[in-house]
Image (cartoon, grey):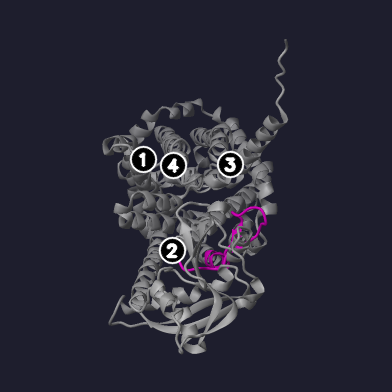
């Protein structure tokens, strides 16, 4: 009997899907880390150049880079954190949401830690596009020095164009991300292989002893160099944030088969080139290529940096959406640019803020050399946050003992603070930028969270229990409101108390609808909620019902669509005879109560920037009634 070894159609389809996901992850997940060879080795050599770079220093430096990639990216992110997921979703806020649900005793500490990581990531979303594109376009100076004065204008034009197309969606463009970045990694690896033979002594960099010896002998300069070495892992946090888009196995396959070998070979090639030709220290990456190839490589590098920038921008959109749904930021406009892919979104406010930030950085610093010191602080800080949350994850979800968790994460808990300390040496050279930005973002998130809590406490004092209200209005009385036909849906965050807008409607209009629905929208601390778990309907009386809609923090909070599913499940109502009642509050600052006056004003400004609930929840605009009130905070 013969057994066929051919793949079944299902197996072939599964294999094709895996390859497509792996190729896509090459472009989206690794686009950022793939551009670090443009500047990382050059910047790491710069502190050593004053006294002349020694052979042992070059080998030790390359060894540091290889083992930094191995320990932080391979061990921490690829092999460990990709398994610490929240229903298949990764990222700082995704992990924070899971931990706040499972470990409620430490929610304050976790909240502060999580929003710090999110704020640092958003700072990275500004610095990465500016640094990467400037580094790529600066290669034009090697083709023709006359291009020197045009590097900044060209880079600015590229950035403006990139941010301008965000509103169109990235679906069509993303299909080209993987192939272009794959070519980029093949070029990286090929250029490295072509020069490793310049001095085979560079292969000894695989021995970590050279990294240790370098740091031991370099003293304070070695500590400063560590800050530049950290540039080799720029974008590593994207591995974790993009977990939900591609899945763990495709991301792992792309790293071990394509990305890691290409990066390692390129750094080895740059090191061998500098060993053989010390004058190549000025720009070891572009000098790997013959003169005729530099211009095509500049174009390819520019395309790769645009892709890297796109992935960071998309990551910023996703992170802000998570922050909004988790209640860390006010509701902002979210546009879905794909009918099938929920991850393809566009936030106009965030897009404009990022563009302005990127342009300011470009004009203030002017070159990648000046901007590079600003980079490491945000990344090293964000990575430490990931490690701290990972410690809580293995303790509370994998039930590891404190001793086991500490022993497992000890290398990271030792190494990453050292990298952060090295990067803090660059504060006066631009490292203050991400610290200021992260501080501003944390202040906004903290103020919004605190203000919402305070507002809820103030309004709670005036609320009437819903059961008490229903009993009162349904009691026969000459002062009972007029019953009008149709359905009224009242949105509220506290379903057990009477919505203020319902009270105002009866007080001013003296009417009560035939059917009244108290609607509460909840955001679960999971990425997605299944349709069958989307809603719960509770009948309170002949005229009153409670409806709870549940969405994941990655879901589109489309109330109209959810109500359509409710109708299919037996919740009968006619949209043309249904009115949605929303309360609109005018906030007034009061320095004598609640928060300090500056924080009151910041909270009011954040509240004013929020999108109208009608648009955010996709309510039918011609069926919405708003009633306002003033609230002193």
* 2 or 1: tag closer to the N-terminus: 2
Q: In which quarter of the image is the N terminus?
A: top right
User: Which residue in the protein does label 2 denote?
Assistant: 327
* Apparent side of residue 329 relative to residue 251 in the rendered image (left or right): left
* 3 or 2: tag closer to the N-terminus: 3
Q: Residue 122 location in percent, x, y?
A: 47, 58
Q: What stretch is highlighted in magenta?
A: 329-354
Q: Residue 182 location in percent, x, y?
A: 64, 40
Nearest to the eye among marks 3 and 2: give it. 2
Q: Residue 373 location in percent, x, y?
A: 43, 54
Q: Please say if the residues under marks 4 and 3 sit with CB atoms less than 8 Å apart.
A: no
| Local secondary structure at mark 3 | helix
Q: Estimate how packed mark 4 is, as few (under 14), some (14 to 19) or many (20 or more) residues with alpha carbons within 10 Å.
A: many
Cα–Cα gap, marks 4 and 1: 8 Å
Cα–Cα gap, marks 2 and 1: 25 Å
Q: Please say if the residues under marks 4 and 1 sit with CB atoms less than 8 Å apart.
A: yes
User: Which residue in the protein does label 3 denote?
Assistant: 287
* Apparent side of residue 129 relative to residue 53 in the rendered image (left or right): right
Residue displayed at 52% across by 88% down: 509
* 4 or 2: tag closer to the N-terminus: 4
User: Which residue in the protein does label 1 denote?
Assistant: 394
Residue displayed at 35% across by 48% down: 422
* 4 or 3: tag closer to the N-terminus: 4
User: Which residue in the protein does label 4 denote?
Assistant: 84
Q: Which residue is more in the foreground, 201 or 559?
A: 559
| Local secondary structure at mark 4 | loop
Q: Which residue is more in the foreground, 142 or 390?
A: 390
On screen, 531 above or below 287? below
| Local secondary structure at mark 1 | helix
How many numbered marks have been drawn onto this rendered protein structure? 4
């Amino acid at each position: 009997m013969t057994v066929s070894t051919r793949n079944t159609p299902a197996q072939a389809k599964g294999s094709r899907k895996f390859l497509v996901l792996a190729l896509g992850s090459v472009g989206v997940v690794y686009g950022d880390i793939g551009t670090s060879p443009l500047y990382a080795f050059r910047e790491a050599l710069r502190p050593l150049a004053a006294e002349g770079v020694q052979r042992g220093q070059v080998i030790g430096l390359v060894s540091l880079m290889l083992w930094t990639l191995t320990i932080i990216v391979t061990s921490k992110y690829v092999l460990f954190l990709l398994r610490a997921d929240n229903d298949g979703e990764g990222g700082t806020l995704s992990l924070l949401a899971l931990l706040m649900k499972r470990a409620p005793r430490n929610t304050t500490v976790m909240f502060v830690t999580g929003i710090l990581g999110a704020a640092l990531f958003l700072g990275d979303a500004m610095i990465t596009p500016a640094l990467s594109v400037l580094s790529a376009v600066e290669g034009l100076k090697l083709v023709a020095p006359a291009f020197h004065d045009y590097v900044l204008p060209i880079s600015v034009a590229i950035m403006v164009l990139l941010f301008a197309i965000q509103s169109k969606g990235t679906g069509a463009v993303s299909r080209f991300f993987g192939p272009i970045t794959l070519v980029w990694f093949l070029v990286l690896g090929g250029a490295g292989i072509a020069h490793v033979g310049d001095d085979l002594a560079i292969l000894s960099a695989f021995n970590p002893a050279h990294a240790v010896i370098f740091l031991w002998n370099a003293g304070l300069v070695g500590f400063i160099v560590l800050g530049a070495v950290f540039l080799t892992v720029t974008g590593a946090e994207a591995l974790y944030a993009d977990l939900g888009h591609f899945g763990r196995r495709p991301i792992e396959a792309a790293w071990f088969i394509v990305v890691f070998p290409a990066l390692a070979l390129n750094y080895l090639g740059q090191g061998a080139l500098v060993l053989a030709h010390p004058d190549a220290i000025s720009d070891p990456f572009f000098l790997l290529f013959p003169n005729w190839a530099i211009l095509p490589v500049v174009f390819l590098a520019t395309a790769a940096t645009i892709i890297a920038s796109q992935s960071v921008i998309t990551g910023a959109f996703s992170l802000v959406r998570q922050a909004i749904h988790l209640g860390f930021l006010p509701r902002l406009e979210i546009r879905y640019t794909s009918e099938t892919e929920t991850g393809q979104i566009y936030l106009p406010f965030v897009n404009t803020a990022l563009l302005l930030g990127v342009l300011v950085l470009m004009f203030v610093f002017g070159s990648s050399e000046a901007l590079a010191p600003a980079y490491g602080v945000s990344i090293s800080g964000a990575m430490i946050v990931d490690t701290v949350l990972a410690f809580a994850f293995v303790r509370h979800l994998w039930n590891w003992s404190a001793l086991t968790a500490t022993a497992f994460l000890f290398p990271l808990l030792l190494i990453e603070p050292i990298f952060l300390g090295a990067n803090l040496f660059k504060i006066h050279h631009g490292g203050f930028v991400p610290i200021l930005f992260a501080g501003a973002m944390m202040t906004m998130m903290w103020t919004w969270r605190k203000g919402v809590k305070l507002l809820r406490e103030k309004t709670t004092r005036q609320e009437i229990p819903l059961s008490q209200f229903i009993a009162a209005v349904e009691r026969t009385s000459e002062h009972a409101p007029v019953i009008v036909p149709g359905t009224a849906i009242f949105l509220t965050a506290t379903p057990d108390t009477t919505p203020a807008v319902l009270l105002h409607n009866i007080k001013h209009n003296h009417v009560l609808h035939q059917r009244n629905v108290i609607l509460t929208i909840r955001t679960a601390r999971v990425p997605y909620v299944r349709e069958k778990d989307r809603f719960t309907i509770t009948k309170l009386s002949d005229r009153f019902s409670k409806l709870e809609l549940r969405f994941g923090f990655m879901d589109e909070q489309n109330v109209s669509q959810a109500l359509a599913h409710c109708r299919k499940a037996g919740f009968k109502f006619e949209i043309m005879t249904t009115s949605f009642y929303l309360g609109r509050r005018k906030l007034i600052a009061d320095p004598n109560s609640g928060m300090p006056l500056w924080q009151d004003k910041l909270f009011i400004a954040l509240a004013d920037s929020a999108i109208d609930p009608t648009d955010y929840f996709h309510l039918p605009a011609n069926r919405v009634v708003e009633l306002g009130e003033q609230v002193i905070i």
